[in-house]
Image: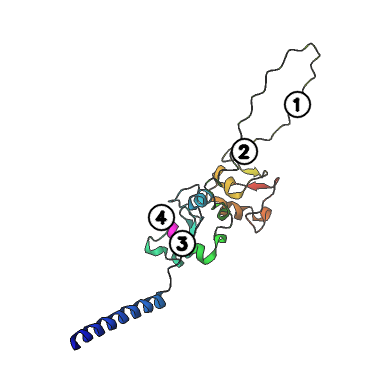
Amino acid sequence: MATEYSARSRRTALAAVVAGAAVGAATLFGPAAPASAGVNWDAVARCESGGNWKINTGNGYYGGLQFSRATWNGYGGQRYAARADLAGRSEQIAVAEKVLRGQGVGAWPVCGRKGGSASAGSARSEKAAPKKAAPKRATTRKAVPERPATKVEPRPAPGAGTYVVRRGDTLSEIAVAQRVDGGWRVLHERNRAVVGDDPGLIFPGQRLRLR
């Protein structure tokens, strides 16, 4: 009887020790931080760098999500690589999740707005196919001369020196379409006197210097 009581006491004491250790670990480390939901990092990367996860243009920002070295190091990127462009896509996303929790989507002031949808980066560039005109019926009436079509100024070809902003344009889309080295950040710095301090606020008619 004494032996049975002693064994039961040892089991009870062991269970208490295990429970205490679990509580201590939870107190020490805290609950795991939940992963963010609803951010499409591929959409952000398409906007930031044209989707090139290995890009290094020498403008001080690296990788598909354009990390500065200070941000990359500050959020643990050194465990993967010296710079973001030397790390893989999944590793850059892992660091981006930490930046998102620390700074919010405003860490990507222009392209962060497109992180909620995979089609956000291309929605504005898609145009509806023109409808075919119905064949004209024969008529004996005198034809009324058609009004001349409004002349549309063509977009400058990639490599041109300047660009005139149109409705719906963003700096990131212009930088990708016009192949601006350094992306929208360099384009913004080059035209800060025209655009102002907010890179997400541009207006039709503004003339931007591309080179």
Which amino acid type is shown beneath numbered disc 3?
Answer: Ala
How many residues crowd around disc 3 within 10 Å: few (fewer than 14), some, or many (20 or more)?
few
Mark 1 or 3, closer to the camera = 3
In which quadrant will I find the N terminus?
Answer: bottom left
Q: How many marks do you count on the picture?
A: 4
Mark 2 or 4, closer to the camera = 4
Which amino acid type is shown beneath numbered disc 1?
Answer: Pro
Query: Quadrant of the rendered structure where residue 87 is?
Result: bottom left
| Residue 27 drawn at (x, y percent) | 41, 78
Tell me the residue that label 1 is attached to: 148
| Residue 123 drawn at (x, y percent) | 58, 43
Q: Secondary structure at mark 3?
A: loop
Q: CA distance from mark 2 to mark 1?
A: 23 Å
How many residues crowd around disc 4 within 10 Å: few (fewer than 14), some, or many (20 or more)?
few
Q: CA distance from mark 4 to mark 1?
A: 54 Å
Tell me the residue that label 2 is attached to: 156
Q: Secondary structure at mark 4?
A: helix
Tell me the residue that label 4 is attached to: 90
Sequence-first disc among 2 and 3 = 3
Tell me the residue that label 3 is attached to: 35
Which amino acid type is shown beneath numbered disc 2?
Answer: Pro
Mark 2 or 1, closer to the camera = 1
Q: Secondary structure at mark 1?
A: loop
Q: CA distance from mark 4 to mark 3?
A: 14 Å
Sequence-first disc among 1 and 3 = 3
Mark 2 or 3, closer to the camera = 3
Identify the magenta region.
91-96
Q: CA distance from mark 2 to mark 4?
A: 36 Å
